[in-house]
Image: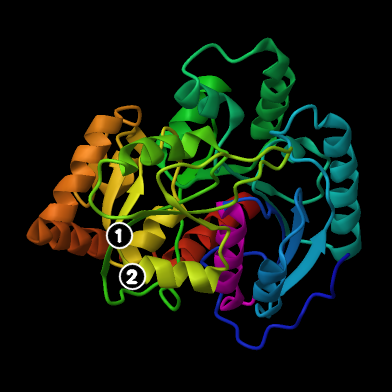
């Protein structure tokens, strides 16, 4: 299923050295990559760049489809192929590769932007940029803290091949780039490009006395379990939003918290606007778009003490060891009971969020595209 590439009404000059006019970009609808891809496409529209968005995995929701229809420079194509990090996906990965090459032959992109690794090794006729949002080996190291099982060796080998074929490898944090070099191979041309988020939807509102946590509830990396265990000793109610069903089946049991389910972007923004505190004690988070959305909404942040989040949020958040639920509860109680401290941290988070703009992200990706095309 797809759509014709739409014309672009407004153009800006490409970056020095030239840039692409048409980009084939992969994405999935499971997590933050979807929001990232749409945000980047909006930013690229101002430069006259058309985006062929090839979406795989779980089909987009009705809300997601409505959102993409409002972006004038996107042509959406989608197939329900398993994603490369899922269990035994390789037949689907091969079929997806053939489909992507067919799209490229039909639509003639100037550049391929992969939000994954494996398909970078395909015989593309144009340069390929790989963006590392996460990976199975660094996830396993951070979350399970043990040797990655032998059954994932094929994944590691395929990721290595993809990375070695990329013209440029980008990531939203330096910590994520370091993980790639640690687990796979030394990289050539690299860029750290922070994700950006539009402020049109995420704005501070009239704050209420509750704690909010958002994320894929089935993903151990998000560490919702720590939020649930801490909620019983926190004086304010704790609300949790996000998909509870794993893409491969199974539901997450929730306790001590108020469940909101998976919210539309508009409804989620209203919860961020009213929340006073945002809790995200992640074990693994290469960037964390929900953290940025909370900061833009002037929430005080309590985050997992991991290298990527320290790198990104500096002194604009309170940090706790991800598996120390007592420390998490203590910081949440402190913010609930100390209004001055809470408002001070909320202001710091808001000020830091100004550094993560979609315009800056789009300009940096155009520069990376230009390097790849050279």
Is residue 61 or residue 289 the one in the foreground?
A: 61
Packing grade of label 2 (10 A; few <14, some 14-19, many >=20) is: many
The residue at 41%/32% (across/down) is 283
Q: Is residue 361 above or below residue 325?
A: below
Mark 1: few, some, or many residues within 10 Å (few <14, many ≥20)? some
Residue range highlighted in magenta:
32-50
Residue 289 to residue 21: above or below? above
Queried whether the magenta region covers residue 354, the answer comes back as no
Question: Which residue position is annotated with label 2?
Answer: 274
- The quadrant where residue 161 appears: top right
Q: Residue 284 in the image: x percent, y percent?
A: 45, 34
For image coordinates 83% across by 62% down, the residue present is 108
Whether pointer 1 and pointer 2 mark residues with C-beta atoms closer than 8 Å, the reply is yes
Is the stretch drawn in magenta largely helix, strand or loop?
A: helix
How far apart are the two marked residues, 1 and 2, measured between alpha carbons? 8 Å
The reply to whether residue 198 is in sight is no
Quarter placement of the N terminus = bottom right
From the viewer's perspective, tell me whether residue 203 is left or right of residue 134.
Answer: left
Residue at image location 71% in from the left, 49% down from the top: 127
Disc on res. 210:
1
Q: Residue 324: x, y in percent? A: 29, 28
Pick whichever, 319 or 7, lies toward us. 319
**On screen, residue 107 above or below 176:** below
Q: Secondary structure at mark 2?
A: helix
| Circle 1: element type | strand
Q: Quadrant of residue 140?
A: top right
Q: Nearer the viewer, residue 328 or 120?
A: 328
Q: Would residue 280 appear left or right of 29 to someone viewing this image?
A: left
Which color scheme does this rendered protein use? rainbow
Residue at point 58% right, 73% down?
42
The answer to whether 26 appears left or right of 133 in the picture is right
- Is 34 inside the magenta-drawn segment? yes
């Amino acid at each position: 299923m797809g759509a014709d590439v739409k014309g672009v009404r407004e153009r800006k000059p490409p970056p020095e050295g030239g840039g692409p006019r048409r980009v084939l970009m992969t994405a999935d609808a499971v997590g933050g990559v979807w929001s990232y891809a749409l945000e980047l496409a909006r930013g690229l529209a101002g430069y006259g760049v058309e985006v062929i968005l090839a979406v795989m995995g779980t089909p987009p929701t009705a809300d997601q489809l409505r959102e993409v229809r409002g972006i004038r420079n996107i042509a959406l194509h989608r197939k329900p192929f398993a994603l490369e990090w899922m269990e035994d996906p390789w037949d689907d990965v091969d079929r997806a590769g053939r489909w992507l090459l067919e799209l490229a032959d039909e639509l003639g992109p100037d550049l391929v932007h992969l939000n994954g690794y494996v398909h970078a090794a395909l015989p593309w006729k144009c340069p390929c940029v790989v963006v590392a949002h996460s990976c199975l080996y660094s996830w396993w190291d951070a979350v399970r803290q043990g040797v990655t099982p032998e059954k994932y060796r094929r994944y590691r080998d395929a990721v290595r091949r993809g990375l070695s074929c990329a013209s440029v490898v980008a990531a939203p944090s330096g910590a994520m780039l370091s993980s790639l070099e640690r687990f796979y191979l030394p990289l050539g041309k690299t860029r750290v490009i922070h994700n950006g988020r539009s402020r049109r939807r995420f704005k501070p509102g009239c704050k209420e006395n509750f704690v909010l946590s958002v994320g894929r509830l089935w993903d151990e990396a998000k560490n919702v379990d720590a939020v649930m265990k801490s909620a019983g000793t926190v004086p304010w109610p704790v609300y949790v939003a996000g998909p509870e069903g794993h893409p491969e089946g199974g539901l997450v049991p929730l306790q001590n918290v108020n469940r909101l389910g998976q919210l539309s972007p508009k409804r989620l923004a209203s919860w961020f606007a009213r929340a006073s505190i945002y809790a995200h004690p992640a074990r693994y988070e290469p960037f964390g778009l929900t953290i940025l959305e909370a900061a833009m909404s002037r929430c005080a942040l309590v985050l997992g003490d991991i290298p990527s989040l320290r790198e990104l949020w500096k002194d604009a958040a309170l940090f706790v060891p991800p598996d120390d639920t007592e420390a998490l509860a203590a910081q949440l109680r402190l913010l609930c009971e100390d209004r001055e401290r809470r408002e001070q941290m909320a202001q710091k988070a808001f000020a830091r969020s100004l550094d993560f703009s979609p315009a800056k992200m789009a300009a940096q990706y155009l520069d990376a595209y230009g390097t790849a095309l050279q």
